[in-house]
Image (tube, grey):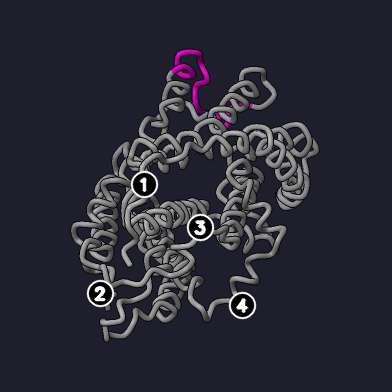
Amino acid sequence: MQDETLARPATEISSAVVSASVTAARPHIGYLDSLRAVAALYVVVYHAVSTAAPGGALPGALRPIGKLMSYGNQAVALFIVLSGYCLMLPVLRSGFRLKGGAKLFFTRRALRILPPYYAALLVSLLLIQTGVIRAPNPLQDPGLTNMMHAVAAHLLLVQNFVPFFIINPAFWSIAVEWQIYFLFPLLLWCWRKIGGDRAAVGTMLWATAAAFLLRRTSLADAHVNFVGFFALGMWAAAHAHLQQDPADKRPALPIPTILAALSLAFVGVLAFESGTKVNGIWIVHDVLGACVWCFMLAALARPGAAVFRRMLEWKPLVSIGQFSYSLYLIHVPILQIVWQHLIAPRHFSQGAQFVSLTAVTLPLCLAAAYGFYRLVELPFMRMRPASRAPAAANPA
């Protein structure tokens, strides 16, 4: 059942009560950092599995680990849902509008995303061109013309649309998220016009339908269904931080029950899926996973979830989450260096290759990512431009 507060247009919810976590000064929500850390660490191990055992087919007792670590898209889906969630929080504080306007929003996003991304792109290019690492996909032609096209696509963040030479296999999702940012003002406009529930569900439906229609085309890697995941994150933020209208006597949305049902369906699909990008089953489990992340975030903000929040706010995990973007950007070249120069020449068994690669690479990636964060990412985070426009009235 829809929450009436969100189902109505934002201009009509003047009686909604905004929770203290939204109206107060912007808080630091530790468990969100922890979730970013979990997603980033999963991606590192996922790429370790795919490096040591292409296709994720680890032998013997490691086979279940290989299966468990074969869903890298789910980690990216969690990143996208978290992005929609976090970007929605200041919007809730500003009356469902972008404080300072779209120009300030895009400026802040550019300062936050682009400098570390371009620095990591340069590092990857230098390592490939100097021969320190081989091209991520040796079947592709690393010739000069192809490389120039690839660099141009990566600089413009459209590499997910074009089948050029892969510079870093992790970078496709940066392009997807960057493109979604340009739709954020439109999503907010829809939110104000038709209400949050309708906007989120409608976006999820058309984005999923578009992904199915494009799955047999060269645009399959555009991952348009991720736009729906972002909208789900926005919806989760609103449900987590906007209390119901006291005049609304209908029961609240049973978020824990829905989360449990979605989780069972999600695990069932993952257990029995045998699909490819052609038949589209991957879209089904991506969508189910995004719904699970959405309802998990909404559930974690509820008063009864305090014990789970405390478990997630384990300080080492929160700390890793703070530089998880840097970890995501630079882990692939480190994996390739360790694999090519340390693991592969020793001709270990496939299982031993995975274990040794993970054991050596994970601490190296964490150390290098923290250094990258301090040198490249953090200085630009401190350059956050301030809004000159007064904040809109809170919808309270």
4 or 1: tag closer to the N-terminus: 4
Q: Magenta stretch?
A: 134-148
Comparing 330 with 320, the one in front is 320
Residue depicted at 62% across the width and 38% down the height: 378
Q: Looking at the rendered structure, which numbered label has been put on residue 170?
A: none
Comparing 374 with 363, the one in front is 374
Q: As shown in the figure, which amino acid type bears the numbered disc 1?
A: Pro
Secondary structure beneath dot 3 equals loop
- Asked whether the residues under the numbered discs 4 and 2 touch, taking CB atoms below 8 Å apart as contact, a structural biologist would say no
Q: Quadrant of the N terminus?
A: bottom left
Counting labels gives: 4
Disc nearest the viewer among 4 and 1:
1
Crowding near pointer 1: few (<14 within 10 Å), some, many (20+)? few
| Label 1 – label 2 distance at C-alpha | 29 Å
- Asked whether the residues under the numbered discs 3 and 4 touch, taking CB atoms below 8 Å apart as contact, a structural biologist would say no
Instruction: Please give the residue where the numbered disc 2 appears in the rendered image.
Output: 4
Q: As shown in the figure, which amino acid type bears the numbered disc 2?
A: Glu
User: Residue 222: in sight, yes or no?
Assistant: no
Q: Quadrant of the C terminus?
A: bottom left
Instruction: Please give the residue where the numbered disc 1 appears in the rendered image.
Output: 390
Q: Does 192 appear above or below 388?
A: below
Q: Is residue 139 magenta?
A: yes
3 or 4: tag closer to the N-terminus: 3
Disc nearest the viewer among 3 and 4:
3
The secondary structure that most of the magenta stretch takes on is loop
Q: Looking at the rendered structure, which numbered label has been put on residue 25?
A: 3
Instruction: Please give the residue where the numbered disc 4 appears in the rendered image.
Output: 307
Secondary structure beneath dot 1 equals loop
